[in-house]
Image (tube, rainbow, N blue to C red):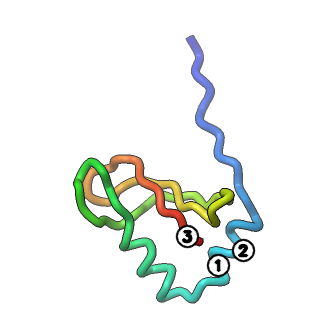
Amino acid sequence: MNKKPKEETISFSANKKWLSIPAETRKSLERNVWCSNCCDVVQIENYTVKESKYGIVLHGTCKTCGHEVARVID
């Protein structure tokens, strides 16, 4: 049985908004993501930037345990 790889949709407008945030603030946001597996604030890695009705969302993995995490930035 062949499984299709998970496809990521790149949101150029979300990425543009993300890059408009100052670099130091972006780094701070990357280090301030809640992981439900660790029950703590962690750093997100390997993330994609997408748009949602609430703002932009970073979807990635926890640097500590590898669990999926997300951060909404409004």
Tell me the tag on residue 73. 3
For residue 35, side relative to residue 8 (left or right): left
Q: Secondary structure at mark 3?
A: strand
Tell me the tag on residue 16. 2
Amino acid under label 1?
Leu
Amino acid under label 3?
Ile
Amino acid under label 2?
Lys
Q: Secondary structure at mark 2?
A: helix
- Asked if disc 3 and disc 2 are in contact, CB closer than 8 Å, the reply is no
3D distance between C-alphas at marks 1 and 2: 5 Å
The location of residue 65, given as percent across then percent down, is 27, 51
Tell me the tag on residue 19. 1
Residue 31 to residue 51: above or below: below
Q: Image point 26% across, 48% down: which residue?
A: 37
Asked whether 12 or 52 is in front, the reply is: 52
For residue 30, side relative to residue 20 (left or right): left
Q: Residues within 10 Å of mark 3 (few under 14, many from 20)?
A: some
- Asked if disc 1 and disc 2 are in contact, CB closer than 8 Å, the reply is yes
**1 or 3: mark nearer the eye:** 3
* Residue sitting farthest toward the right: 13
Q: Residues within 10 Å of mark 2 (few under 14, many from 20)?
A: few
The location of residue 45, given as percent across then percent down, is 42, 61
**3 or 2: mark nearer the eye:** 3
